[in-house]
Image (cartoon, grey):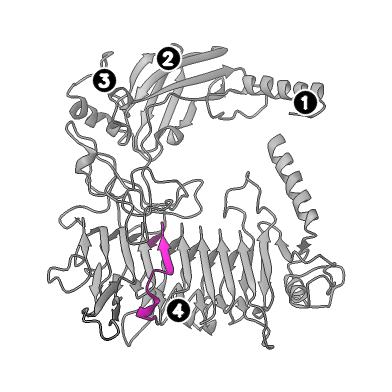
Amino acid sequence: MFKRLMSLGLLCLAFDAHATVYVTTTADESGTNPSGCSLREAVAMMNSGDGTQPFGGCVSADASKVIVLKANSIYPINSQLQLNSTVTIQSSTTGDFNVTDGTENPIIQAIGKHRIFSINPNGTANSPIPVVAITNVNLNGCGGSVVCDTNGGVIFNKGSLSLTAVRAYNGIAKLGGAIYNENTGKVVITNTELKDNTAEQGAALYSIQPAFSVSRSLIRNNKTENSSGVGFAIYTMTSDVNIGKVVASILGSTIYNNKASAINIVPGVGVGSVTIVGNLGGVTLNAPPMVVTTTPAPPSTTPPKVVTTFTSAFANSIVGDNNGADCTFVTGDKTPMEHIAYTNTCKDMSGLYGTFTDGKDLSGKTLIAGDTSVTDGSAVCSLPPAAGLLCPFHNYVGQFTGYLLPRLIPAPNASLANELIVNQGNNSTTGVGCTADQRGLSRVLCDIGAIELVIPAGNAKDNGQDIFYGQTAQIDLSPVVGDGQLIPAAYCVTLYNSSTPPQGGTWLDGCVRYIVSPTKGVASFDAAKNLLSYKPSSNFHGLDVFTYTITTSTSFFSEGESNKTIAVTTRIYQSPPTGITSKTVGAGGIGVFAVIALLGLALRRRLTGGQS
């Protein structure tokens, strides 16, 4: 609580320093209520001059031009908001490290049949391009069955737009269900979700030119309704081979379950470390190279020099189960493809198209370990030894966007060298190398796809819980297990070639081996739920501390023999009922010790005058 109050205080100081404009009413009004500042009034204020003059109920500000919306609030608007000037729109929790991105986003909601934002210079000569940043805000389009607007169901962009920790959904348009990016526009999309949008073309994003960057984002459940041809979730209308290099990119992201093909790759577009699964179609490659012929001037007899430059890239990505069409090649394409894991149609057997380096053929393999009919993010991953290279799409706790997690299946002679996804990528020479994964984690050895699987090093972990008499402790082991899965008890027999654990008895889920056994209760483990349950044998008052090792699907692949298991120490503190609610304490702490630590901190701050 102390940490949260401190961070909120610092946040307020930061806002005051920039004279931020706070939106104080959710009503969509303009000049009618001098006691409240509406979003529409705040935008109008920013559009006028330098944005320092009061408007409606919005007080004056300096030129920093920041609009703050209250977290968890809904702001209905009756018509689009025109952004003609540079502005930042963010949540009151932006910058608060105690709030996970997306969990408290305010919502701007279109009430009528219109888009939410039109970002456009004001039309006068030499008008500056608006630079617009939207952070920690959800944008709920008009929904229904009628288009919100022709171009851009949620956003029309003719400026420089960045979206961070944004959800844009329920947009409907002819072009660009969520976002339409005009000729002079540029869009940077980071840690954002574009979902449930509809268009004839570009269900999530339609860009006239390759002028966009998508990273660490999720594109899902978007739909094209295109009777004249193939529709795409992300679509670039036109490009010139003379662009000569990759200028637009989709990196470290997931494109999943769209009723559309995923992407069209044209000159200037690079796709790297992306997971493209379960769409109506995969990737269409249509990027001829740039060919420059240089003829020496007479009287030189040197033959003309021909230089071919690739204009696109596709690397370190998974393309699978996309309705039998993971890759579609257009005549003339020469896109370099490196480290692509695919289920069909991606390896050009004719040699007519771009280079194909170190691809991974997944045909005949089970791609998803779980129920593929569950697409809302609640699907459960099957436990080893069930086949499947990826867990189903899932919304993981603490993550803004969901993803398909790579899997490892332990076996007595299994080796990472034989894997098809994990450690099989490379820092591509195509310009779309191994960037951070969708969660923002750095890549160590470069897995193929959006997620870099984290394999723990077997370091000791602590956890614990306070309980009262008559209660059973329930401890979530997910922080210990990480990206892995607990090994079911029945599979421990095969994995360790032994019918019993070394200390005797029967195997438990996680292949538990006690170093110090519980003495005052019984512990049980549930691999399906990543759960440790502890039931006291009596109403003792005090501690029961026990230490054990567990085996997970990832720890088993650690290089060091001593690291193939994870050591865990669990502390259970039981006491008589006091009327105070029992709480789980992570990192091995327990309530009584936490209180002592806080008292010590308070004393330290008192003695030092608050200096640390």
Q: Residue at label 3? A: 506
Q: Is residue 320 magenta?
A: no
* Sequence-first tag of 1 and 4: 4
Mark 4 vs mark 2, CA separation in Å: 64 Å
Mark 1 vs mark 4, CA separation in Å: 57 Å
Measured along the vertical axis of the image, is residue 553 above or below residue 311?
above
Q: Position of residue 312 (x, y in %)?
A: 34, 70
Q: Residue at label 4? A: 209
Residue type, numbered disc 4? Gln
Tell me how many marks there are: 4
Q: Which residues are magenta?
A: 239-257
Q: Residue at label 2? A: 518
Q: Is residue 252 magenta?
A: yes
Residue located at (54% from left, 80% from top): 184
Mark 1 vs mark 2, CA separation in Å: 38 Å
Secondary structure of the residue carrying numbered label 1: helix
Secondary structure of the residue carrying numbered label 4: loop
Q: Residue at label 1? A: 605
The answer to whether residue 468 of the structure is visible from this angle is yes
As drawn, is 610 to the left or to the right of 156? right
* Sequence-first tag of 1 and 2: 2
Q: Residues within 10 Å of mark 1 (few under 14, many from 20)?
A: few
Residue type, numbered disc 2? Pro
Q: Is label 4 in contact with label 3 (beta carbons under 8 Å)?
A: no
Measured along the vertical axis of the image, is residue 226 above or below residue 562?
below
Residue located at (37% from left, 79% from top): 242
As drawn, is 586 to the left or to the right of 327? right
Residue type, numbered disc 1? Arg
Mark 4 vs mark 3, CA separation in Å: 63 Å
Q: Is label 1 in contact with label 4 (beta carbons under 8 Å)?
A: no
Q: Is label 1 in contact with label 3 (beta carbons under 8 Å)?
A: no
